[in-house]
């Protein structure tokens, strides 16, 4: 299989992307997650080369695409608009869209903005439709003040430091401990490419991860207005309009039950870290409840179903945040069956 790394100039930015597969086969576009790039799809693209015509772009501030400022107040819109510019530049019209984590949020926003272009939507461990952090209950009620405990202030500060310092050991440990289920071993050469990808994240107040503000209420941080992490804040990120899109494509939602990044009680939630006393001073569940991210996604997808859409939920036992990585065969089987 020939997997090509290319670049294209769109009317918004220069986009690096990987292309693989069979010309004339069903089109599948793959969106990566936070602190990664299209590199993370290379093993999957190799396995699917006979089945699909595939593109895996790097989003702005990731991989080899342009590092451009991000106004977070539009939520996922900045990435959705970048994606549509990319689609127009490469000449695609109708395609299936797979989004992982942050990319899952972007995929939902793209479905909201351009439902007519999608034949199917695949969400792998997506961020909650209500954003990442700062909400509670399955219907996404917002904690006050809105944006508390979310955005760049809640981002993984040690990982940001590791990227700034080029710390390959820490980046590798992050992959082993968060991207895949603990104990799973990624091929050594592939792991090195993944580390390279993480270290290419463009750090800055208006890039990765962004700015934040100090507040008086625990956990004493709230989202700012710039950068990647703040696009996920519930202050700006609301993907519930997915329920009412006019052209309802089938949705596959797949995730691991051992995901430490996106879950009903995961380590990405400051409330959980507070309960564990990793962040001291937790005021209690009645003041700062945790975010049930999986339940929130199900809540929205059930409303999507009630409005005439269809979705399939697949929970993979013993898999972490990247089911495509630590349970590749199952992921491929589910994807092929869904898109057949």
Image (tube, rainbow, N blue to C red):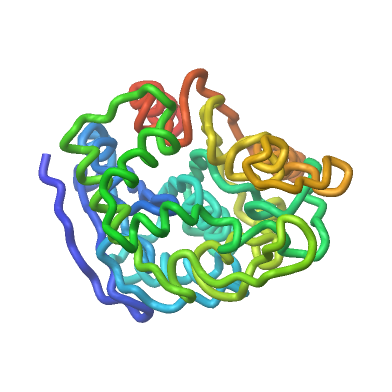
Q: Which of the 4 image quarters holds residue 263?
A: top right
Residue 257 visible in image: yes
Q: Nearer the viewer, residue 46 or 133?
A: 133
Q: Which of the 4 image quarters holds residue 154?
A: bottom right
Left or right side of 271 for 120: left
Q: What is the x, y in percent for residue 300?
A: 72, 44
Quarter of the rendering occupied by the C terminus:
top left
The residue at the far top in this view is: 317
Left or right side of 290 for 171: left
Q: Is residue 337 above or below residue 149?
A: above
Q: Is residue 223 above or below residue 118?
A: below
- Identified at 47% across, 30% down, the residue is 320
Q: Nearer the viewer, residue 57 or 285?
A: 285
Left or right side of 115 for 136: right
- Identified at 54% across, 75% down, the residue is 226
Q: What is the x, y in percent for residue 14?
A: 28, 74
- Identified at 50% across, 46% down, the residue is 101
Quarter of the rendering occupied by the N terminus:
top left
Q: What is the x, y in percent for residue 259?
A: 53, 32
The residue at the far front in this view is: 280
Left or right side of 297 for 206: left
Residue 305 visible in image: no
């Amino acid at each position: 299989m020939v997997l090509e790394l290319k670049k294209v100039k769109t009317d918004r930015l220069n986009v690096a992307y990987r292309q693989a597969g069979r010309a004339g086969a069903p089109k599948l576009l793959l969106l990566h997650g936070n602190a990664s790039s299209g590199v993370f799809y290379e093993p999957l693209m190799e396995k699917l080369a006979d089945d699909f015509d595939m593109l895996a772009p790097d989003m702005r501030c990731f991989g080899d695409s342009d590092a451009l400022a991000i106004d977070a107040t539009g939520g996922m819109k900045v990435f959705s608009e970048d994606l549509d510019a990319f689609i127009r530049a490469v000449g695609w019209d109708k395609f299936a869209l797979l989004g992982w984590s942050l990319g899952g949020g972007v995929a939902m926003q793209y479905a909201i903005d351009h439902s007519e272009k999608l034949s199917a939507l695949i969400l792998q461990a997506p961020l909650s439709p209500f954003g990442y952090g700062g909400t509670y209950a399955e219907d996404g009620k917002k904690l006050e003040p809105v944006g508390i405990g979310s955005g760049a202030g809640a981002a993984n500060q040690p990982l940001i430091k590791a990227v700034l310092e080029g710390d390959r050991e820490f980046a590798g440990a992050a992959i082993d401990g968060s991207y895949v289920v603990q104990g799973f071993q990624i091929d050594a050469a592939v792991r090195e490419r993944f580390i390279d990808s993480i270290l290419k994240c463009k750090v800055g107040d208006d890039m990765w991860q962004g700015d934040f503000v100090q507040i008086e209420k625990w956990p004493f941080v709230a989202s700012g207005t710039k950068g990647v992490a703040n696009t996920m804040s519930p202050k700006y990120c609301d993907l519930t309009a997915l329920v009412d899109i006019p052209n309802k494509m089938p949705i596959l939602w797949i995730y691991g039950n051992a995901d430490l990044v996106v879950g009903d009680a995961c380590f990405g939630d400051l409330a959980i870290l507070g309960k564990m006393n990793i962040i001291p001073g937790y005021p209690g569940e009645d003041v700062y409840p945790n975010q049930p991210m999986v339940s929130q996604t199900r809540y929205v997808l059930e409303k999507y179903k009630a409005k005439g859409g269809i979705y399939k939920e697949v929970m993979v036992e013993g898999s972490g945040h990247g089911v495509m990585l630590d349970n590749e065969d199952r992921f491929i089987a589910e994807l092929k069956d869904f898109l057949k």
